[in-house]
Amino acid sequence: GQQVMQIPQYQHVQEGEDFTTYCNSSTTLSNIQWYKQRPGGHPVFLIQLVKSGEVKKQKRLTFQFGEAKKNSSLHITATQTTDVGTYFCAVSGYSTLTFGKGTMLLVSP
Amino acid sequence: KAGVTQTPRYLIKTRGQQVTLSCSPISGHRSVSWYQQTPGQGLQFLFEYFSETQRNKGNFPGRFSGRQFSNSRSEMNVSTLELGDSALYLCASSPGQGARMNTEAFFGQGTRLTVV
């Protein structure tokens, strides 16, 4: 099945710094989804990207889908302590979502 | 609209026992997927059910099984528990009209299983 590599595994930033996580695939993806899981919580859907080169914004979060549809990124501008959690990318397949290993974000006040 | 409900939230079992976990999807959702989450392996797909039929299964041993009822509620069963089965088991529901999972998945709070 499809696999996605997500980097970095872990990032610790000071509040106010930016953060980016990357998701890469060796094959062309039909779409990519992003989820956030707070500590002790469950994954919560953030967004889905479908089109080549697509860029979507949600307040301080910017999501991009690569031109070749093989990579995606999530960028957070000026992190806040509420951004703490693990961010996962996920690609859809036949009746399944394949998740990246996630990037754990820690934000120090 | 009520979210995805998983019961129980926490469970402690002994090696060799079996366990059944339950998931009630969002009303109207016919697709239910199960995932195992561990620190080392991340989120791993177990299986997906749609209208009582298993459409896909992940790479897990036969000790892991599931089913879906006519009201879309789903159960998963793990027999002959091993220490390595300790994990957070997450259920996700979606409308599931098409087989390709290109819609938002709504996750439950999960069941934390500890095998001792």
Image (cartoon, grey):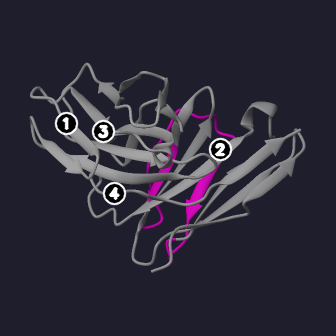
Q: Chain of mark 2?
A: B
Dots 3, 1 in contact, CB < 8 A: no
Does residue B100 appear in this view? no
| Circle 1: element type | strand
Residue bearing the label numbered 1: A64
Residue bearing the label numbered 4: B104
**In the image, residue B70 lies at what x, y percent?**
50, 75
Dots 3, 4 in contact, CB < 8 A: no
Which residue is at a point 11% across and 40% down the rendered structure image?
Answer: A54
Residue bearing the label numbered 3: A77
In front: B110, or A63? Answer: A63
Q: CA distance from mark 2 to mark 4?
A: 25 Å
Q: CA distance from mark 2 to mark 1?
A: 37 Å
Q: Chain of mark 4?
A: B
Q: Amino acid at mark 1?
A: Gln
Q: Amino acid at mark 2?
A: Phe
Q: In the picture shown, does residue A95 fall above or below B39?
A: below
Residue bearing the label numbered 2: B64
Report whether mark 2 lies on the same chain as mark 1.
no
Residue B74 lies in quadrant: bottom right
